[in-house]
Image (spheres, rainbow, N blue to C red):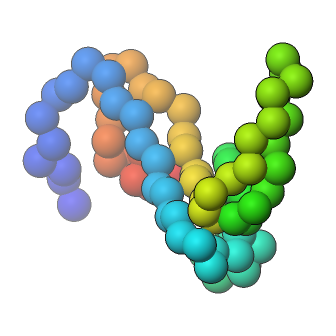
Amino acid sequence: YKSKMPIISHSSAAIRFAGDDLDPDDLSRRLGATPTQAHRKGYVRTSATGGVRVEKTGFWSLGVDDREPGDLDAHISD
């Protein structure tokens, strides 16, 4: 298979899921992947400056490093 993607200078990619009932551990197990970011609804996050934030919904994200020159096919494989 030869890709028909045009030449691009930069690419980035991520897959993300969000929802009030999202269970990050269950989703990780089903996908067989470890997220780069994940939390359940209601998770309390404290920033480096001491601010507090309660997450309004569940979230799961898996991102890969940006590529220059761009290579979207490689991102999808990653």
Q: Image quadrant for the N terminus? A: bottom left
Res 8 quadrant in image: top left
Q: Depth check: 76 or 3 in front?
A: 76
Give the percent coordinates (x, y) of residue 48: 85, 21
Q: Residue at x 58, y 54 (%)?
A: 61
Tell me if I can see residue 76 in this picture. yes
Write the residue at 54% across / 70% down: 19
Quadrant of the rendered image containing residue 65: top right
Front residue of this view, candidates 49 and 22: 49
Specify the quadrant of the image occupied by residue 38. bottom right
41 in relation to 26, above or below: above
Q: Is residue 34 in sight in this rendering?
A: no
Q: Position of residue 71 (x, y in %)?
A: 33, 35
On the picture, is 50 further left or further right than 10? right
Tell me if 9 is positioned left or right of 17 in this view. Answer: left
Q: Nearer the viewer, residue 52 or 24?
A: 52
In the displayed structure, 40 sits above or below 55; it is below
* x and y, in percent, of residue 63 in the image: 55, 44
Q: Nearer the viewer, residue 2 or 33?
A: 33
Q: Residue 22 location in percent, x, y?
A: 63, 74
